[in-house]
Image: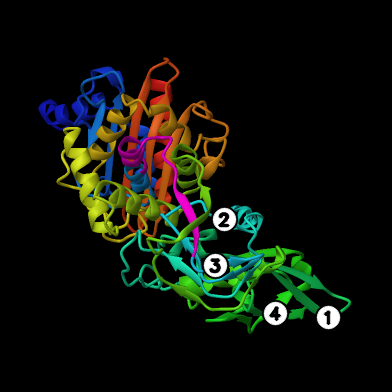
Amino acid sequence: MPNSKSLLPVFAFALSLVVHPACRAAADLPPPVVAAALTRGEIPLDATGIYVQQVDSNAPLIAFNAAKPLNPASTMKLITTDAALDLLGPAYTWKTQAYTTGTLDGDVLNGDLIIKGSGDPSLVTENLWLFLRRIRDDGIREIHGNLVLDRSAFAPVPYDPAQFDGDPIKPYNAGPDALLLNYKAFALHFVPHAKAGRVDVSIDPPAAGWRVTPPRLEGGPCLDWEAALRPAPAADGIAFDGSFSAVCGDKTLYVQPYLTDDTAYFGMVFRALWSELGGSLDGTVTDGTAPPDGQPVAEWQSPPLAEVIRHINKYSNNVMARQVLLTIAEETNGGVPATTAQGAATVRNWLAAESIDTTPLVIDNGAGLSREARVSAALMGRMLLAAFRSPAMPELMSSLPLVAEDGTMRKRLIDDGVAGRAHVKTGSLQDVRAIAGYVLAASGKRYVVVCIINHPNAPAGQAAEDALLQWVYEHG
């Protein structure tokens, strides 16, 4: 029989797992239900960073491995959007402006139409149509000149949409653009016609000159229909060398036309919409800058920042987050063409001004779609604590997915007590799972909760994240 003294460490460890949470030291292991979930997922504890603190407390309840720099995946968007709310204000809007050169003879413009962007993340087809409608209402129908696109708000930098994961056709790999339109994506709608033996493919938004060659129709089972399409993109369209099963029914595929440059993409959509409005364009579509003597024609104003960040955080829109980081740079650096490095430096200084240690922080695009981005659970948690005390707290919190209700958390914890009582941003990459946000516990106390897992088995860590959220709800 072992010596009774040798059992003391084991007994002390077991006791540490069952004592009341308020009595635990912040350096303790995660709650037992969380540790057990990590064990089942074969995720070592040292691959996980956890930070939990009541918003009215001066010390964390749990700070396990909290100083370790980890890849936060899309929870990085919380830092970008919170900085934007504080530095730009919830009511901040982006403006897209139209100017003309030359003369207007009746409804004929003998000159150029210039469209100047400011980085609006939310300029979609419907908004562009309304903007062009205003230009038409100003009396312009025929443009005997060029369409000039001024995207000088952002510094031109090389961008490789294949760099992250080698899949450039995916819309999440779109790069930033001061005249970003429709997230630079197309929605391709597939409609099989079995009797006619064909597949019809329509494109949204419409794009003049961008051609689609449909796949062949087959009668087999509908399995991995996207892979079966075998897309072959080109600069002026896309062909599908594979097949589409008739039993799949109507389907929609979202693609980024990565071989079509940003100028050409905007120009193709412009020509289609302008033609629908009864207009014509004789010249080419080219990049340039608005001249000082250009005649203002129309202006489109985006929804306010508070509304924009709801789309970013609830649905984890990467290119919109990139746009916001560059806008921070453009607005806080004297209006010079913005770079992500400037935006990252501004955010770092903003955090430091909040007395938050930025040593673990690496920001490369503000969206978290990165292998290099780093943040610690403690940094994220302290930022969320500072955000809770800020005037823009309601805007930030309401932008986060509501557990079991919407966004990227709509299918999680549906039958648990924490459902509907936590606003949580998720993050997911290969080898990464993360959550960060706020939990309203059953006690009525609100807590900041952060959990970041970096490990090849990270996908199995979702159970541990969910267990942590439910534990905080029950025991906080």
Mark 3 vs mark 2: in front: 3
Mark 4 or mark 1, which is nearer the start of the sequence?
1
The Cα atoms of the two marked residues, 3 and 2, are separated by 30 Å
Q: Is residue 146 magenta?
A: no
> Could you tell me which quadrant the N terminus lies in?
top left
The image quadrant of residue 31 is top left
**Residue 197 image label:** 1
Q: Nearer the viewer, residue 62 or 298?
A: 298
Residue appearing at x 47%, y 72% in the figure = 263
Q: Is residue 190 left or right of residue 41?
A: right
Q: Nearer the viewer, residue 182 or 386?
A: 182
Q: How far apart are labels 2 and 4 at the CA level?
A: 25 Å
| Residue contact between numbered discs 4 and 3, judged by CB atoms under 8 Å | no
Task: Give the class, few, some or many, for how many residues have Cα within 10 Å of label 3's Cα (few <14, many ≥20).
Answer: few
How crowded is the residue under tag 2: few (<14 C-alpha within 10 Å), some, or many (20+)?
some
Rounded to the nearest whole Å, what is the CA distance between mark 3 and mark 1?
Answer: 53 Å
Q: Residue at x 21, y 39 (%)?
A: 351
For marks 2 and 1, give the CA distance.
34 Å
Q: Which residue is labeled 2 in the image?
A: 124
Tell me residue 447's x, y (percent). Answer: 35, 25
The residue under label 3 is which amino acid type? Thr
- Would you say residue 99 sits in the magenta stretch? yes
The residues bearing labels 4 and 3 have C-alpha atoms spaced at a distance of 44 Å
Specify the amino acid type for callout 1: Gly
Q: Which mark is residue 226?
A: none
The reply, left or right, for residue 228 in relation to residue 314 is: right
